[in-house]
Image: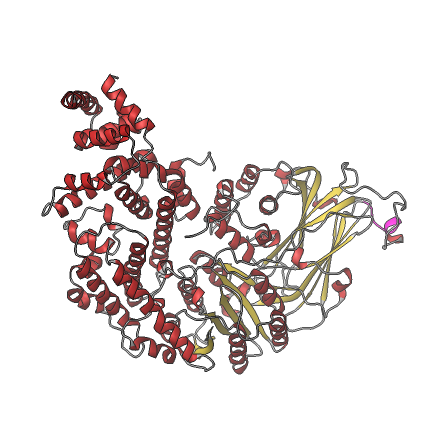
Amino acid sequence: MDMQANDEDLAELAAAGNAGAFRCLLERHYDRVYRLAFRLTGLREDAEDLAQDICASLPKRLQSYRREAKFTTWLYRVVLNAARDMHRRKASANRATDGYEELANLERDGREEDDDQTAWLYETLDRIGGDLRETAILVLAEERTHAEAAEILSVKESTISWRMSKLKDKLKSIAKADA
Amino acid sequence: MTDELEKLKAAFRQERASDPDPEARHAAIHAAMLQFEELEQEKNVAADQGSAAEDRLKTRASEISARILRRFSMTMTRSRLSYILAGGVSLAALVLVVNLNSQNLPGLPPQHGDREQAAPAGGGLLSLNSAKPEAPAPVVEEQSSPEVSYDVAAEPAPAPASGAIAPMAAAPSMAAKRMADGRTRTMAQTRAPQSVGGLVPYSNLAGTDDSTPGYQDQGRDRFSNVPDNPVKRVADDPVSTFSADVDTASYAFVRGSLNRGVLPPKDAVRIEEMVNYFDYDYPVPADRSQPFKADVSIMPTPWNAETRLMRIGIKGYEIERAEAPKANLVFLIDTSGSMNAPDKLPLLRQAFRMLVSNLRPDDVVSIVTYAGSAGTVLEPTKVSETGKIFAALDNLSAGGSTAGGEGIRQAYQLAGEHIDKTGINRVILATDGDFNVGISDPEQLKDFVERKRETGVTLSVLGFGRGNYNDLLMQELAQNGNGNASYIDTLSEARKVLVDEASSTLFPIAKDVKFQVEFNPAEVSEYRLIGYETRTLQREDFNNDKVDAGDIGAGHTVTALYEFRPSSATGALIEPLRYQTEAKSDTGDKTVTGYKTGEIAFLKIRYKLPDEDVSKLITTPIGADAVKAEISEASNDTRFAAAVAGFGEILKGGKYTGSYSLDDVLALAASARGNDPYNYRGSFLELVRLAKSAGAMEPLKK
């Protein structure tokens, strides 16, 4: 792979109609998109659908990509928004019958390959929920700096720091409850 | 960081559950590439300002139905929980497809308001799509009514519905083609039975191939495998003879490959066609008695300090559109099933539309299609009846196998009926592949084309698509038919070939153009002709007027490059022979005495005027005055041609280019852009950058 072409150049080329540049971007970033989608949804099928839909929407979305943000920052934002939409949709679709979380838990119980720690991880993430979960994933899993996470989530950097300390408290209380 | 946060972070790090599945990855990238192509098609349609509003409406409608159909097939490949609305949705989608396609049925007047009328019938679905035709894949979009928009559009059909639709859509089409086999029918007749079933075949939609789960050729492109021109020793073989080549198909094919991130097969790279893809500003003769004159420049070879690069260029004079001879064109269009792809039939339709828009009112156009059976779709029609021609183009649909031979016969027959001895009579063949029915023997086909050439009808070949592209046969057909072969991969390429260069593509100003270069052994020790492998001629063929060679159209430029080693330079690739005396060669005495010192080579060009059978000769001695000591002193054209040649050599494996890299090509080409109004040279730079990241093989499609 060509290490000299940066993402931002490729994004511009792709927006101008260069299929090779677009494919290059996809190859480079699919794993990132999928991983984030998986961590946000906790379900392989949902993450795969989400990642595919995001990829398929990229040609149109790239038309409005501007260099103001790094491509990865922009992409994280796209994934986060898509995941939020999906969550909202599923929640409202299932409200009539079961709570979404319950359904998700049922589906998850069917998984066999997860080891204990992974199971603990996703259980914990589900219990954290919402803003804190997104922030935790960006900072701890994607290892973004607080400044980058702030840019991705369109909040102040101080908000991220505050959320992280709140996350710590929450983890403590979860640990206490389990014990 | 505290223990709690560290523990969570560690859990993320060791967790493997979020590793992507390669299949899903592949599917996602494939889906994204389809969307990308679709968007580019839409952009092209939008850019086509000349098309009337009703056409836009139609295109839009078929795009929307295409999108829905694609989702049928996408849904089929994925197993997932389908949430709500499943039954009702498939019904709505079916209604939509039928409604939209009733526009395309023959015999019905165009229904401009169709989409609006259909809105209530299609329920929420259609109105949603009409209101937001540009909406990207809906999942990631904010919608006011999320349940309907998301689930309807992204999951329109449960498995049973999609399973039922695909075969139904395909079946009537195949049946109709089979019925029609062996008989000549017009398009309307052939199409009539298809619509009886109520469901219009999927293949009638423009630009929808990607969604068919069916047939997709891959890796069946065929190229002739011709070894590179070898280095020759002047003492043994001082004369080099070749035919002019103004084809550009190779460049466009290479570009198509690289745009998909794949290096082209080496045999697909014909360096002379890549060099000749670009326009060069060579001097034109002052009067028309001579169609062109030779322009020669020599500079150090960019990839080898010891050798020199000799660039020979000719440019034919331009014909203004007003004085161009009358054109009698027959479009011979391949409508076999494999043409049903966005980069084939829909692109072809737009390309011909552009060409027709640029002809004069009293030029004559006819259309013959071939697929299973050959048929005349449009009897010879004056260009002034634009609407009739466009309607015939729009009605083309793809399906069936390929009977190229029969189609060619009919096309030539039509061209013959309306032959205009003072004008241009040309069959323009547009196809993606080979001719497997009819005259199936390629040799027989070539003979046929060659014999027809003598009656005054010539052949141009436009290649479309890839996967099953038969470069070899198309080249040979075009060469034997006195025409040219071009590969059309984008609408802008179509514009370049059919509009910007229409005069050169259509109006030959010289035929059987041959080059012969004799090198002076006192100045040159070895030489190598770059490219033209498929165009080399025997030395004695040069003066034989019966031997066919390439044609040059108005405004065409032809560029040939030789890499040669001056006698003074060391490091010759070929050692002198031990048992031969140095001066021995078949030009004998001439090499020993007879030559003028200081003269590097002697260039001879033979050509015939379009309506003459006896060739004329242009001779040009190449002396020291053509030599530039530094690359930077050479003209933009020379340096750019050298950069393109270097690029081609690298793509072919870099046998002669040593450590010369794509970055060097970039630097040289970037310094030589000159006046580039159509940005052809600019896009070359882009292509070289793409080559840096291209992979060697195309990933197999699922």
Q: Is residue B378 visible?
A: no
- In the rendered structure, the answer to whether residue A176 lies left or right of residue B664 reads left
Q: Nearer the viewer, residue A36 or B278?
A: A36
- In the rendered structure, the answer to whether residue A16 lies left or right of residue B327 reads left
Horizontal and vertical percent for residue B623? 75, 47
Residue range in magenta is: B591-597
Which quadrant does the C terminus of chain A fall into? top left
Q: Relative to B395, does residue B467 appear above or below in the rendering?
A: above
As drawn, which residue projects farthest toward the left? Answer: A96
Q: Name which residue lies at 56% across and 51% down.
A: B265
As drawn, which residue projects farthest toward the top? Answer: B2
Secondary structure mostly seen in the magenta stretch: loop
Q: Is residue B398 visible?
A: yes
- In the rendered structure, the answer to whether residue B194 lies left or right of residue B274 reads left
Task: Residue A82: name its quadrant.
Answer: top left
- In the rendered structure, the answer to whether residue A114 lies left or right of residue B642 reads left
Q: Relative to B356, does residue B78 appear above or below in the rendering?
A: above
Q: Name which residue lies at 46% across and 60% down.
A: B494
Q: How is the image coloured?
A: secondary structure
Q: Nearer the viewer, residue B20 or B361?
A: B20
Q: Name which residue lies at 24% across and 36% down.
A: A40
Horizontal and vertical percent for residue B148? 16, 54
Task: Residue B447: name its quadrant.
Answer: bottom right
Q: Relative to B193, does residue A169 appear above or below in the rendering?
A: above
